[in-house]
Image (cartoon, rainbow, N blue to C red):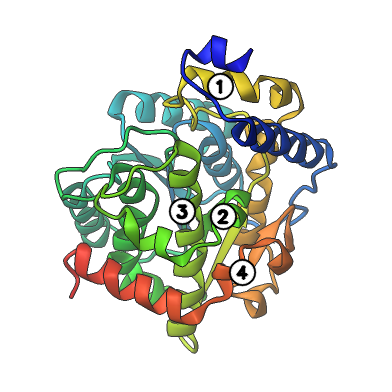
Amino acid sequence: MLQQIIGVPVSPWVVAVAAGAVTVLTLFALKRPRKCTSKVDLTGKTVIVTGANTGIGYYTALDFAARNARVILACRSKDRGQEARDKIVAATRNENVMMRVLDLSSLSSVREFASAIKEEEDHLDILVNNAGVFGAPQKCTEDGLELNMATNHFGPFLLTQLLLDLLKMSAPSRIVNVSSGANQFIRDADLVFDNLRAERQVSSFTKYSITKLANILFTQELERRLKGTGVSVFSLHPGDVKTEIGRNLHWALKLLLLPIIPFMRTPEIGAQTSIHCAVTEGIEKLSGKYFIDCCPAEHKVSPLAKNEELAKNLWNVSLALTGLS
């Protein structure tokens, strides 16, 4: 039946894996999510949220604005970013919300954005690397990087590196990297490096999972290098959330996911762990950890996520491919 719908041959194991994935995602979606309970006021704090015009990023930024922070929305679309900014200001009455264009798939756009931030802001207290893509075509960007990896890993990696001095000057400060439970599906370390320039044809889900494992590896290596600076860094799985991130998926895969859509979390609920990692007091000692539902969940990552050598190798490759070494 599935083969008839999609129009291409589908092996039984693919159907089995897809069915298993839908079952697992449904069970996770049915789990009662926890909410961030912190009442911390962010008056005087400056925060950046990437991908803040929609979904999890929008509700993360909305929460920060409600806490009286100066919020910088980093959005790929100027029009959609401005629309989000206006909605947040109207909802919170916080006029100190700014919008700047940022295309994380373009290293030049990242550099331009970071340069403007360093020129205009005298401190930065929270950076939330939220923006991401799922199912984007497998092709190279203008920088010669695979599009999904460029947007989900290399862009945030470069942005963070360029803003680190400002974050250190503002310590105690925090970096929050939005990953995904999809990282658990990557068990072959070679996959992490085989597709940096779109050399190897892999499925949309595999591409996405690789980038989400990269987010965790980056977080853990960054934590090791930030010891003693007062900058904390966290990664997280927001849960299975109904957002626009899968807008580029093949229609057949969207069809497979239809059964769980009614059970998926709203973006507002999906934002809770990002908010928790950004504002909750006393969690600095958990820097480097991976969170689910506002709690550490180190047991729910791929074994590769705990591989220090892999993390260091990815760090060095990322430095080279983003022009930092």
Which secondary structure lies at badge 1? helix
For the point 66% across and 80% down, which residue is it? 285
Image quarter where the C terminus lies is bottom left
Percent x, y of residue 242? 62, 29
Q: CA distance from mark 2 to mark 3?
A: 7 Å
Q: CA distance from mark 1 to mark 3?
A: 20 Å
The mark nearer the N terminus, 2 or 3, is 2
Give, as a three-letter code, the residue at label 3. Answer: Ile
For label 3, the crowd category at 10 Å Cα-Cα, with few meaning under 14, some 14 to 19 and many 20 or more, is: many
For label 4, the crowd category at 10 Å Cα-Cα, with few meaning under 14, some 14 to 19 and many 20 or more, is: some
Q: Residue furthest bottom?
A: 228
Picture quadrant of residue 27: top right
Q: Is residue 33 visible?
A: yes
Residue carrying label 1:
254
Residue carrying label 2:
183
Q: CB under 8 Å between callouts 3 and 4?
A: no
The mark nearer the N terminus, 1 or 2, is 2
